[in-house]
Image: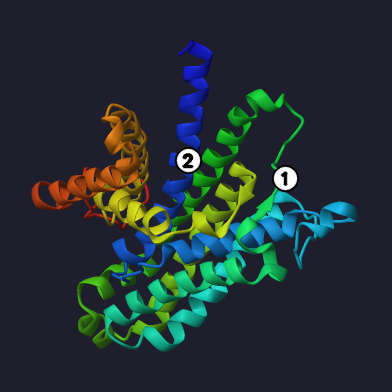
Amino acid sequence: MELGGFIAYLVSLAIMASIYAVFCLGLNIQWGYTGLFNIGIAGFFCVGAYTSAMLTTPKPTGIYAQYVNQIFGLNLPFVVGLLGAAAVCGIIGFLIGIPTLKLREDYLAIATLGIAETFRLIFNNEHWLANGPRGLMGLPQPLQGIVSAKHYNYIYLIVVVIIMLFIYLLIERAIRSPWGRVLRAIREDEISASMSGKDIFHFKMQSLIFGSMVMGVGGALYAHYTKSISPDVFTPLYGTFIIWVMLMAGGSGNNKGAILGAYVIWGIWIGTSFMTDLLPYTLKARAPYIRFLLIGILLEIILIYRPQGMLGEEKRVSKLLEE
């Protein structure tokens, strides 16, 4: 591989790792700081991607309209797509939280898992909404035309990293405030937090909504990077399982760990594709399953030998910048 091609490959890897880091930051708010067991990340991934796609693409016209069924096509700017994705995912998080957050933790897991698959099936079966299983193509990208299409990924990497860092700083500011300390108190002991006069339900709801909105932004970033989306992308394996592995590997309850875990695990995930290329021809058809097996084994090793993750949770959170 030539040097230019190798650098382009690393840029593409960094873009996807940064997008997954956004998902990890959203999950860290819910699980790492509040203890909310959300295993339906793929649903917010899906809704965020489709919302931004339908807001930013023009509605099909002419001959093209015969092949693409899309009820929305507002042709709005990229930023509006991000904000719309965050808003819609926040509303969905709110609706899920109303019936589940007053129950035991496993009810939230059941609800989020079910709603994730429901949204995927809705977009797959309702052709009038977003073109059914064929999905949407030709999604616009921000700052197009500044450089050639061959070098555009460098621009998009900068965009994604800026958004990721903004979300990171926002969460850091929030989690080191009294609000963030209440979330940790709820995670550690709900009864004690309640006896201190804290409204457990409302703080859990705020955490669920905040994390869901961050995940919606991640879905939008993914959609505009790939420029095409379809329901088969948002499966639990790619949309939920690998994100949990990233957070556990980096360090639950640590935003730096969430980002580090995303980069490390995505690098390993890509690396396993080279490993499976070395398999005998008879096993190549099973390569995807072998990759999932390797990631699963890695997660087991992390949980056994390094349960706190690579960085572990930060114990002191009262100051944003320590002297």
Q: Which structural element holds mark 2?
A: helix
- Rendering colour mode: rainbow
Which residue does the image show at 49% across and 74% down from the upper left?
Answer: 118
Labels 2 and 1 touching (C-beta < 8 A): no
Which residue does the image show at 67% across and 56% down from the upper left?
Answer: 53
From the top left corner, tell me how far across and down residue 264 is, in percent: 31, 37
**322 left or right of 126?**
left
Residue 307 position (above or below residue 261): below
Q: Which residue is mark 2?
A: 16
Residue 308 position (above or below residue 282): below
Residue 42 position (above or below residue 278): below
Residue 170 in view (yes/no): yes
> Which of the two discs, 2 and 1, labels the residue nearer the N terminus?
2
Q: Residues within 10 Å of mark 1 (few under 14, many from 20)?
A: many
Q: 130 and 36: which one is in front?
A: 130
Q: Which residue is mark 1?
A: 140
Which residue does the image show at 59% across and 28% down from the upper left?
Answer: 154
Q: 294 and 44: which one is in front?
A: 294
Residue 67 position (above or below residue 104): above
**112 left or right of 167?**
left
Q: Which structural element holds mark 1?
A: loop
Q: In the rendered structure, which amino acid carries the disc numbered 2? A: Met
Q: In the rendered structure, which amino acid carries the disc numbered 1? A: Pro
Q: Residue furthest front?
A: 282
Which residue does the image show at 42% across and 63% down from the upper left?
Answer: 41
Question: In the rendered view of the protein, which quadrant contains the C terminus?
Answer: top left
Report the number of numbered marks: 2
From the top left corner, tell me how far across and down residue 311 is, in percent: 23, 44
From the top left corner, tell me how far across and down residue 7 is, in percent: 49, 20
Residue 323 in view (yes/no): no
